[in-house]
Image (cartoon, helix red, strand yellow):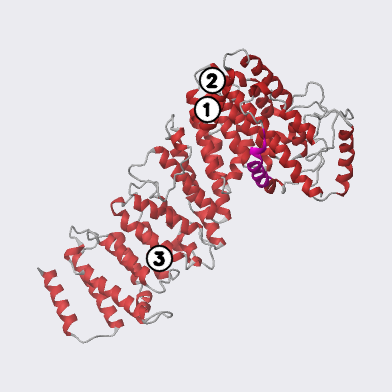
């Protein structure tokens, strides 16, 4: 009854009395607030009374309106009411009262009061000791672990504060030290000890409220994009952000199911902003949405933050649980790593993953080398996914990857049998290479545009016998346009690699070794008659991509079948020749083989690789499908030769 009467009397006074100066009004309501608070509380004892039955909310609301009203009339200087609040530490006192929370709901009400106030003030002066000290106390009261029931209001306060720091980035470091209350902008020497803004935000990482989750992520993105260098350093040195982001991804990875719907996930990109549901999302969605968020942090964060996250991802996730033995590798693991690789391509994270792929650890092989060994197993579905991943890696056109996978083995030209020229034009080309090498600063190349191009193309076109051709025209012209477009893209990337323009160096002291990757490719080519057409398609794509590379030694070794090779040196041309002859002998013994070839052509061109896998039941279908794929491989390789020749001939002219 007493509180209600007091409320009524206060309302009457406010209605009848003439307007009073803002400062007096501010002091009046502050003193009334303190008086009411003391009336309802006893030192050391928390009341069971709810704040709504007291006059406290009324006086706090009036106090806020006075501060905001006076602020609207003076945008650039501190008004008298705000000066009073700052000099008498009103906000800090409110924060201390919120910490004690001797009345039910008082903590939450003060949090809302401060949120609304700093959001609407023209200049909330976050760096002022009185304001920052109060905000830091409230940050500690927003810990999700302690107060999850009020998470909506708490994340709103944190988001409001983060948004304001965009316009006051110099104040951000105050809220990002471990002992932010003792941090001094001019002398930042205090040793951090307590909870800071980012670490408080990270307590919301497992929230079951999607809206809270989205705001939590947005808060992090705001803070990591602040341009002040001291802010980036503080985030890395004084917060747990980088470690928590990476550890959470590791935990989500460990929760992934052992079997995944590869077909459904292949073309889907899961985004944290649109696809995540804190309550209903499955483990796969949670993992890829969180990975998408990490990529966004790496893309847009300060350089020091991005580097730190990449390093921690390598040690916490990739080094710790992804260095698998041959027996431990599963289809799910390969698919997930490939999907992560694809998603990371447009971010600095791709450089870390590429480095990890090439790097051995302790006694374990580099992941790429282990994956090569997988291709020798009898598990064709696993082999297919590994080969698909190889295609993705090669398509990235990373210089160090290409060197590691294949170029290091052909750079010394140890495959070449010197001074054993087949024709005069070959000998002339060798002499011209040395001449051009001394004067050429463009991309002219006798290696990539040899004078014997007609003979090289004819040898490759006639490699596939006429009686096996499912395409009556057997022409490579249909591939010219798409090959030309693709080559321009490849060349635009590779022209920055400082590759040589001519293949002239010969190291006669070394025995040629094609390297484990090409060795595996040759092995899979030999297996084509009996292996899955889906794998053969992957081999075709790999060979075509390697053929695209404007590297003289690789080009000469892979595409120029007229080059004299050392004895027992394997080559793509000779290997294909052996396999095609084997397939020809088998197919010609089968009835209606030409009709079967036409049927196989329709099947190969109309189905994707997954459907091909699904339909692979008969040995006869496998044989004919592979024959068609080999036919198209020969035509595509000719198209690459043709395009590269004319591309470099243009430079010659």
User: For this view, does 338 lie left or right of residue 289?
Assistant: right
Q: Is residue 561 magenta?
A: no
Q: What residue range appears in magenta?
A: 475-490
In x, y percent, where is residue 472?
63, 28
Q: Which mark is residue 275?
A: none
Which quadrant of the view contains residue 560? top right
Residue furthest out toward the left: 1
Answer with mark 1 or mark 2, whichever residue precedes in sequence.
1
What residue is disc 1 on?
Answer: 603
Of helix, strand and loop, which mostly describes the magenta segment? helix
What is the crowding at mark 1: few (fewer than 14 residues within 10 Å), some, or many (at least 20)?
some
Direction from residue 629 to residue 411 in the image, left or right: right
Q: Residue at x 56, y 30 (%)?
A: 386
Q: Nearer the viewer, mark 3 or mark 1?
A: 1
The earlier-in-sequence mark between 3 and 1 is: 3
- Tell which of 60 and 293 is nearer to you: 293
The residue identified by callout 2 is 621
**316 or 628: which is nearer to us?**
628
Residue positioned 27% across, 80% down in the render = 25
Observer able to see residue 641: yes
Tell me if residue 476 is in the magenta stretch. yes
Residue, far bottom: 18
Q: Secondary structure at mark 2?
A: helix
- Where does the image place residue 107, in percent across and percent down from the top left? 28, 60
- Mark 2 or mark 3, whichever is nearer to me: 2
Residue bearing the label numbered 3: 133
Expressed as whole percent of the image width and height from the top left, the position of residue 270 reads: 44, 44
Q: Say if 261 sits above or below 121 in the image.
A: above
Q: Secondary structure at mark 3?
A: helix
Q: Is residue 603 above or below residue 199?
A: above
């Amino acid at each position: 009854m007493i509180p209600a009467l007091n409320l009524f009397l206060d309302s009457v006074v406010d209605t009848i009395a003439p307007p009073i100066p803002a400062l007096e009004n501010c002091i009046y309501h502050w003193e009334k607030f303190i008086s009411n608070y003391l009336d309802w509380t006893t030192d050391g004892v928390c009341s069971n009374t709810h704040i709504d039955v007291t006059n406290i909310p009324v006086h706090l609301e009036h106090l806020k309106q006075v501060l905001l009203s006076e602020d609207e009339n003076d945008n650039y200087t501190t008004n008298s009411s705000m000066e009073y609040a700052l000099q008498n530490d009103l906000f800090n006192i409110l924060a201390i009262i919120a910490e004690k929370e001797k009345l039910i709901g008082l903590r939450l009400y003060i949090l809302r009061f401060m949120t609304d106030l700093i959001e609407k003030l023209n200049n909330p002066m976050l760096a002022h000791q009185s304001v920052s000290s109060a905000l830091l106390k409230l940050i500690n009261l927003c810990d999700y672990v302690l107060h999850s029931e009020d998470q909506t209001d708490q994340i709103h306060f944190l988001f409001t504060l983060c948004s304001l720091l965009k316009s006051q980035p110099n104040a951000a470091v105050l809220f990002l030290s471990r002992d932010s209350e003792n941090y001094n902008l001019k002398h930042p020497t205090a040793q951090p000890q307590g909870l800071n803004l980012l670490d408080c935000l990270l307590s919301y990482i497992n929230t079951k409220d999607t809206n809270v989750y989205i705001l939590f992520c947005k808060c992090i993105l705001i803070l990591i994009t602040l341009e002040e260098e001291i802010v980036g350093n503080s985030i890395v040195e004084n917060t747990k952000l980088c470690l928590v982001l990476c550890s959470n991804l590791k935990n989500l990875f460990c929760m992934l199911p052992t079997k995944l719907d590869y077909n459904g996930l292949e073309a889907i990109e899961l985004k944290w902003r649109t696809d995540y549901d804190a309550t209903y999302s499955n483990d796969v969605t949670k993992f890829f949405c969180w990975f998408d968020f990490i990529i966004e942090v790496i893309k847009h964060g300060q350089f020091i933050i991005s580097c730190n996250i990449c390093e921690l991802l390598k040690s916490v996730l990739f080094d710790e649980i992804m260095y698998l033995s041959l027996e431990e590798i599963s289809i799910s693991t390969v698919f997930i790593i490939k999907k992560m690789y694809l998603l990371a391509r447009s971010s600095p994270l791709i450089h870390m993953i590429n480095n990890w792929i090439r790097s051995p650890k302790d006694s374990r092989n580099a992941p790429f080398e282990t994956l090569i060994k997988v291709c020798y197993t009898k598990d064709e579905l696993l082999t297919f996914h590994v080969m698909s991943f190889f295609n993705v890696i090669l398509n990235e056109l990373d210089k160090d990857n290409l060197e590691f996978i294949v170029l290091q083995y052909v750079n010394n030209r140890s495959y070449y049998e010197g001074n054993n020229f087949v024709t005069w034009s070959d000998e002339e080309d060798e002499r011209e290479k040395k001449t051009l090498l001394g004067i050429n600063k463009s991309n002219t190349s006798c290696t990539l545009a040899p004078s014997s191009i007609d003979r090289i193309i004819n040898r490759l076109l006639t490699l596939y016998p006429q009686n096996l051709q499912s395409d009556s025209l057997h022409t490579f012209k249909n591939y010219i346009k798409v090959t030309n477009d693709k080559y321009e893209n490849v060349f635009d990337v590779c022209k920055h690699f400082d590759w040589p323009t001519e293949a002239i160096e010969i190291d006669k002291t070394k025995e040629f070794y094609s390297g484990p990757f090409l060795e595996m490719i040759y092995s899979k080519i030999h297996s084509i008659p009996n292996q899955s057409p889906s794998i053969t398609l992957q081999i075709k794509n790999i060979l075509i991509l390697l053929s695209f590379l404007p590297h003289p030694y690789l080009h000469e070794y892979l595409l120029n079948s007229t080059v004299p090779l050392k004895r027992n040196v394997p080559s793509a041309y000779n290997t294909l020749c052996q396999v095609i002859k084997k397939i020809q002998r088998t197919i010609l013994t089968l009835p209606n083989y030409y009709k079967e070839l036409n049927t196989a052509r329709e099947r190969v061109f109309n189905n994707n690789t997954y459907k091909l896998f699904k339909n692979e039941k008969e040995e006869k279908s496998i044989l004919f499908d592979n024959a068609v794929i080999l036919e198209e491989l020969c035509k595509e390789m000719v198209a690459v030769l043709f395009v590269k020749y004319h591309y470099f001939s243009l430079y010659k002219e």
